[in-house]
Image (tube, rainbow, N blue to C red):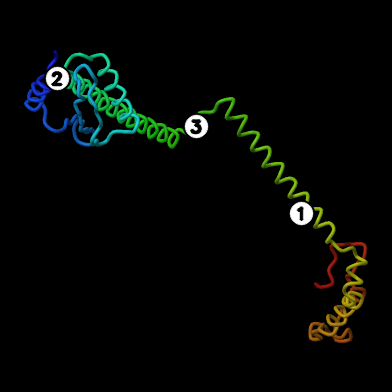
Amino acid sequence: MTDYGEEQRNELEALESIYPDSFTAGENDETVQTTLKFTYSEKYPDEAPLYEIFSQENLEDNDVSDILKLLALQAEENLGMVMIFTLVTAVQEKLNEIVDQIKTRREEEKKQKEKEAEEAEKQLFHGTPVTIENFLNWKAKFDAELLEIKKKRMKEEEQAGKNKLSGKQLFETDHNLDTSDIQFLEDAGNNVEVDESLFQEMDDLELEDDEDDPDYNPADPESDSAD
């Protein structure tokens, strides 16, 4: 007859000498930690022990779920043998795998950020490469904006045409237009000043008569009225 109590005591002594209360994996902010709690069933190891994750650090919900599934699978495969060491070892390997996934994910995120920064810098200094697709997209947007501008301009011109008054409308609007020109002429006439000193009386002018000159020859252009 199997002495379950003896087997359990022997395993417990071995586990206490091997493991502390908890196991930690990883470094710095990549650290993950879990504390497993095992409870022997009456007929352990012929029956699986009861187990639970007593506490954990930096584990996602899906990580906790994966660990519980792993424990169930390992317990089923090791029935009939003391298995706590095997279960804990499987969880240790899982935690190390989770740490590696965290490292890989963060490295990929870092590379992605560096790539995005590099692309942003290229666009800043070199602009966006012209392709048929982005050119057609730009042209469609440009044509749409141009059409809106034309529509707006036509609407403004149409509105301006409606607001423009004809000569008759202007006349009817401003009754002073019929007298404004006349008034301007009258005002201008009243302001005209003549400097009479610029003129001389015709009687004051002394004109010489070339015909009284005995040497005057009207046929000779070189003739002089003076000696």
Q: How crowded is mark 3: few (under 14 residues within 10 Å), some or many (20 or more)?
A: few
- Name the disc covering residue 128, or none: 3
Apparent side of residue 190 relative to residue 153 in the rendered image (left or right): right
Residue nearest the observer in this picture, 151 or 3: 3
Q: Helix, strand or loop at disc 1?
A: helix
178 horizontally vs 37: left or right: right
Residue 114, disc: none
Quarter of the figure with residue 184: bottom right
Which amino acid, by three-letter code, is at mark 1?
A: Glu
* Viewer-nearest residue: 197 or 183: 183
Q: Distance between the residues labelled 3 and 2?
A: 74 Å
Q: Which quadrant of the view contains residue 87?
A: top left
* Circle 2: residue type: Tyr
Where disc 3 sits, the SS reads: loop
Frontmost of labels 1 and 2 is 2
Task: Look at the numbered disc 2 and give the secondary structure of its residue.
Answer: helix
Task: Tell me if 139 is positioned left or right of 216 in this view.
Answer: left
Is the residue 166 above or below the residue 185 in the image? Answer: above
Q: Name the residue under label 2.
A: 4
Q: Where is residue 205 in the image (x, y as percent from the top left)?
A: 85, 83
Q: Name the residue under label 1.
A: 156
Query: Closer to the N terminus: mark 3 or mark 2?
Result: 2
Instruction: For the residues labelled 1 and 2, say whether their Cβ atoms are less than 8 Å apart.
Output: no
Marks 1 and 2, how far apart in space?
A: 99 Å
The residue located at (14%, 14%) in the rendering is 2
Q: Give neighbour class at mark 1: few <14, some 14-19, many 20+ (Cα, 10 Å).
A: few
Identify the residue at horizontal 84%, vertical 72% (top origin).
225
Answer yes or no: do the residues labelled 3 and 2 have beta carbons within 8 Å? no
**Pointers 3 and 1 in contact (CB under 8 A)?**
no
